[in-house]
Amino acid sequence: MRAAQAAPGPAVPRRAVLGGLVASAALGGCTRADPPPAVSPGPDVAVLTVAIAAEQRLIMLHEAVLRAHAGLAGRLEPMLAHHREHLRVLQRHYVPGTGEGASAAPVPSPTPFQAPAGRSGALAALRRAESEAAAARAADVVKIAPGMAQLLASIGACEAGHAALLEAALEEEE
């Protein structure tokens, strides 16, 4: 004898039943009266926006020195290219609207930098700016998540290298 068959009617696949349950649960969640929670910026946003603004200032300073002292292009253009790349990478990590009322990454004052008149003064100003930026990035790494800390540590190391190259250039100028 054969075993008893299930009740007659179309077989409903298990996936269809589960999908229906998930869909009804999701639709039920859409009818809540509570507003969605506000998105608040992560702790890395403040550090990131400061780093972006610092790179923008370094770019502007390098460009001002190059305008005033075109003969330094061979030394400074590779550094300027590094800063432009740093800025591009940092901006990729910035999510518009996560800063304090900002919809875009910060931009420093539109006032252009004035390069010191002498080559040595210009190199010294760049060395000082690079050293300060390297120190700031080193201080930043203890404030943020490990992934962003690695990025800022790499940028800071590059800026420290720039400061050392500029120090050597200053010694040659003397």
Image: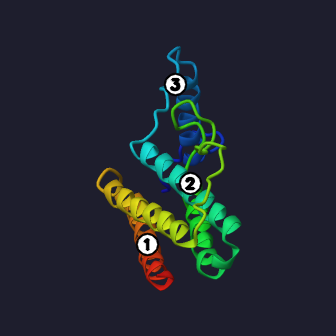
Viewer-proximal residue, 4 or 125? Answer: 125
- The residue closer to the viewer here, 139 or 141, is 139
The residue that mark 3 highlights is 36
Please give the name of the residue rendered at 61% of the width and 69% of the height, measured from the top-left corner. 80
Q: Residue at x 55, y 23 (%)?
A: 28
What amino acid is labelled 1 in the image? Ala
Determine which residue is flagged by label 1: 163
* Mark 2 vs 1: CB contact within 8 A: no
Q: Position of residue 134 (x, y in %)?
A: 40, 64
* Picture quadrant of residue 74: bottom right
User: Earlier along the polypeptide chain: callout 2 or callout 3?
Assistant: 3
> Furthest residue to the bottom?
172
Asked where in the image residue 64 lies, by quadrant, the reply is bottom right
Residue 82 to residue 115: above or below: below
Viewer-side label of 2, 3: 2
- In primary-sequence order, the first of circles 2 and 1 is 2
Q: Which mark is residue 57?
A: 2
- Compared with residue 83, is residue 9 higher up or lower down, i.e. above or below? above
**Label 2 vs label 3: CA separation?**
38 Å
Question: What amino acid type should be assigned to the residue bearing mark 2?
Answer: Arg
Residue shown at 62% from the left, 72% from the top: 81
Q: CA distance from mark 1 to mark 3?
A: 48 Å
Within-10-Å neighbours for mark 1: few <14, some 14–19, many 20+: many
Q: Residue at x 43, y 82 (%)?
A: 171
Front residue (pair 19, 117): 117
The amino acid marked with disc number 3 is Pro
